[in-house]
Image (tube, helix red, strand yellow):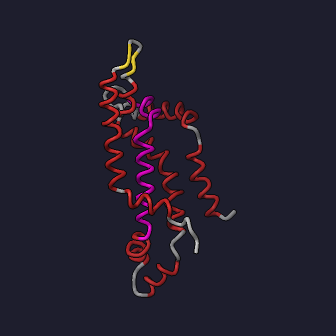
């Protein structure tokens, strides 16, 4: 295996660890750093677990771009940064859209991190929804209302990026 493949495997293997395995050490680290019950703590946790997946997914989209396109831009006088920004980046926008929506859905639906690392002042919507089912009964009206609140932003976000999602997920599916 080449060094690039080793690095790529190492990046995605960090995502393979079950959350239940890392939750206890993270709890102690968060407690020591004062990140429990903070939004910053949740942001760090979600980034830590979604970034490897996003890197892995985006890597495959960038691998689909022929190197000749960037080389041609550099021959025409563009710097490496300009070739990346004006040639490669527009070509991977569908992949970025697909990666963004998948990462946002992962973070939006996360329950365990929010349950363990937050309290009633910083909890996320899924944790608040779970508290509506009590030993004395289920508050169905509130459960239905919070269900809409949970679902609506994801539906709107999906409608906004649907073109990117479809083309991003099918990018590279057919070789010529």
Q: How far from the left and from the top, in percent, is residue 137?
A: 38, 15
Above or below, 164 against 135 in this view is below
Question: Given the current orientation, which residue lies at the most extreme right position?
Answer: 1
Q: Assign the magenta stretch its main secondary structure.
A: helix
Q: Residue at x 40, y 65 (%)?
A: 93
Indicate left or right for 68 with 118 as reference: right
Indicate left or right for 56 with 140 as reference: right
Above or below, 66 against 5 in this view is below
Q: Residue at x 53, y 30 (%)?
A: 24
Q: Nearer the viewer, residue 59 or 109?
A: 109
The quarter of the picture where the C terminus appears is bottom right
Q: How far from the left and from the top, in percent, is residue 11?
A: 57, 53
Q: Nearer the viewer, residue 143 or 62?
A: 143
Q: How many marks?
A: 0
Question: Given the current orientation, which residue lies at the most extreme top position?
Answer: 136
The quarter of the picture where the N terminus appears is bottom right
Q: Nearer the viewer, residue 163 or 39?
A: 163
Magenta extent: 91-118
Q: How far from the left and from the top, in percent, is residue 91?
A: 43, 70
103 is within the stretch colored magenta: yes
Q: How far from the left and from the top, in percent, is residue 128?
A: 35, 28
Q: Residue at x 41, y 74 (%)?
A: 81
148 is within the stretch colored magenta: no
Figure quadrant of residue 56: bottom right
Q: Residue at x 50, y 35 (%)?
A: 26
Above or below, 59 against 44 in this view is below
């Amino acid at each position: 295996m080449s060094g690039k493949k080793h690095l790529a495997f190492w990046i995605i293997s960090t995502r393979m660890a079950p959350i239940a395995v890392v939750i206890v050490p993270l709890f102690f680290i968060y407690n020591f750093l004062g990140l429990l019950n903070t939004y910053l703590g949740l942001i760090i946790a979600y980034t830590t677990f979604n970034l490897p997946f996003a890197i892995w997914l985006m890597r495959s989209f960038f691998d689909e771009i022929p190197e000749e396109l960037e080389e041609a831009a550099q021959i025409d006088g563009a710097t490496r940064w300009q070739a990346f920004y004006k040639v490669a980046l527009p070509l991977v926008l569908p992949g970025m859209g697909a990666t963004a929506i998948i990462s946002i859905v992962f973070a939006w639906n996360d329950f365990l991190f929010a349950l363990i690392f937050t309290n009633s002042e910083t909890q996320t919507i899924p944790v608040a929804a779970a508290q509506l089912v009590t030993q004395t009964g289920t508050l169905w009206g509130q459960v239905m209302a919070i269900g809409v609140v949970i679902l609506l932003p994801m539906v709107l976000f999906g409608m906004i990026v649907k073109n990117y999602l479809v083309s991003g997920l099918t990018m590279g599916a057919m070789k010529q």
